[in-house]
Image (cartoon, rainbow, N blue to C red):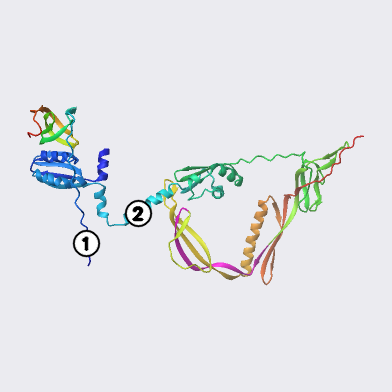
Amino acid sequence: MTLSDVVRYFGGYVWFSAEGGFPARLLSDAAALGLQITHAKREGEMLYAACPAAHYRYLRPIARKACMRLRIYRKRGIYFTLFPYRHRLGFPVGLVCAAILLSILCGRIWVLEVEGDMTPYRQEILEAVGENGIYVGCRIDAVDMQTLRLNALSTLEEMVFVSVNPTGCVARITVNERIPTPDITHFGQDISNMVAAREGRVLWMEVYSGRGAVAAGDGVAAGDLLISGAFQSASGNNYLRRAAGRVMAETTHTLSATIPLSEDIPSPTGRVVYRPFLRFLRWDVPLFCNTPLEGTYTVEEYHRFPRGNNLTLPLGLVDKRYIETANVTVHRTEKEATVLAEQALEQQIQQLTASGVTVVRETARTHNTDDTAHTLSVTLLCQEDIAREVPLNVDILPRVSN
Amino acid sequence: MYRKPRRIRPPRPAPKPVPPPRCPLHIELFTNRRAVVEGCLRITQYTSDTVGLYTAQGEVLFHGEELRLTCLSDGTANLVGKLTAIQYANNKTEESL
C-alpha cells in the first residue's frame, strides 16, 4: 500500500465501470475538470477506473455526454466503513472516552514491581516508596528520584540502594540489600561489669576481658557481680576495662498457662456476603447497591486481575467475602482445657528455647482447676548464659603530680 | 408516526474547468513498462492496445498490450503496460479536432 493509497482511503474512493460510448472523451473531460481518475483499465468495451467519492457525482454528466453508462462496483474508505454506524452514538462516545483515558493514563504508573529476590521486604519497600509519592496511579513525571533515594533509604535500614526506573507505565524498583558489618568490640573504651541476669548456679565461665568474680559451682542471685571490669593486678596496678565473657549457669524457669473454662469467642454465624469491586489502579468501584453491613465481619479478598507479559494489569475484579461473626460462649470441659493449656505451654517452651535457653529437665506438671479456669504450670531446669553487661560509672580523679 | 422531513441539501457547485497545461510535451519512459507523459491536452484514443494523447506538439500514440492509465491529472498521464511502439501522428491543432 502506497502513501497515495492511504490518503485515498481516508478520503474514500469508488471503483466504477463505464460501458459503451467514448471512454477517451470521458477521461479527457474528467481531466479537464480536474477530476482525479486513477487505475483506468480497458477490457473490451468496458472501462474500469477509480475516483474519489466526492468526484463521482461530477462524472455522471460527463459520462452522459460521452454516451457512457456508469456503475459503481466497489466502495472503499473510512467514510464507507463508518457509514453503517452513523446512527450509533456509542462509537464516537467510546472513541472520545478512549482518547481521554489514553491521555490520562499514559503518564501514570500502572504497575509497581520490585526487582530481585526481595519477597521478605516487598511490602516494606512498596510502603517506603509510597510515602515518597510512588504508588499505582501516580504521575511518572512527578517522581523526584533524588528525594526518593534519600527518604526511602532512611526508612529502609536494611537497604543500601533504592532506584525507581519507569519503563512505559511500569515502574521497576531496584534495591540492594545492605550487608551487615561485623560487630567490633572495643574492650578498652567503655568500662563495664557483667552481672547475673537471674539467679542460678554457675556451671562454667569464659572471661574475655576483666576478672572473674565467681567460680564454677557458686550460687548467684540476680544482680550479683560475675565479671569485674575494675581489678588490680598482682603487681598492684589498677585497671579499668570493659568486662566481657560468658557465664553458663543452671537456672529454673516456671511457666504457666491458664485456660478459662468458659469464654466468649468470635465465631462465624454461617452468613456470608459476597461483594464484588472493580479495582482500577488504586480505586475500588463497587459493583453492588446493597445497604451497609451491620455487625461484625471478617473480610477475605480474592483478586482476579488479568496478566500479560508477566505483568498484572491494574484493572480487575476484587471479590470481598464478608463472613459474619458473633461472640459465642464456649464451655470447656476440664479435659479440653487441659489439652489447650498443654498446647499453650508448649508454645511458651518453644519461645524460651528460641531465646537461647537450653531446657535440661522438666519437673512434673501441676494441674490446678478452679471454678473459672484451668491452670497448668511447670518448672524447667535450664542452662543459659546469665551474664549481662552493665556500665560502670567511675569518676577518675586527675592525677596530681608532685 | 411523525417522521422528520428530510433536509434537502443545496446542489454543490460544479467544479470549474482546469486551464490546459502550457508545458511542452515531455515523455519519460521506464523500460517498456511505464511511460509518464506531461503536457497532455486530451485523450484521443483509449483501448487496451492503443492510447492516443493529444499534446500541444501533436498527437502521440502508444501501442502495446494491456495498457492502463493509472493516473490522469494536471496534464500528466501515467501509462502502464507492455509498450511496443510510440508513434507521432500529424501535427494538428486543438481546434481542428
Which residue occupies 88% across, 36% down? Answer: A235
Which residue occupies 12% across, 35% down? Answer: B43
Taking the magenta stretch, the answer to whether it contains residue A278 is yes
First to last magenta residue range? A257-281
**Observer-nearest of B52 and A132:** B52
Residue identifier under label 2 = A94
The local crowd at label 1, few if under 14, some if 14 to 19, many if 20 or more residues have their Cα within 10 Å, is: few
Left or right: residue A175 compared with residue A44: right
Total residue callouts: 2
Q: Residue furthest bottom?
A: A371
Q: Nearer the viewer, mark 2 or mark 1?
A: 1
Instruction: Say the numbered circle drawn on residue B5.
Output: 1
Residue A1 screen position, x and y as percent: 26, 39
Residue A350 screen position, x and y as percent: 65, 54
**Observer-nearest of A264 and A64:** A64
Which residue occupies 25% across, 49% down? Answer: A79
Say which amino acid is labelled 2: Gly
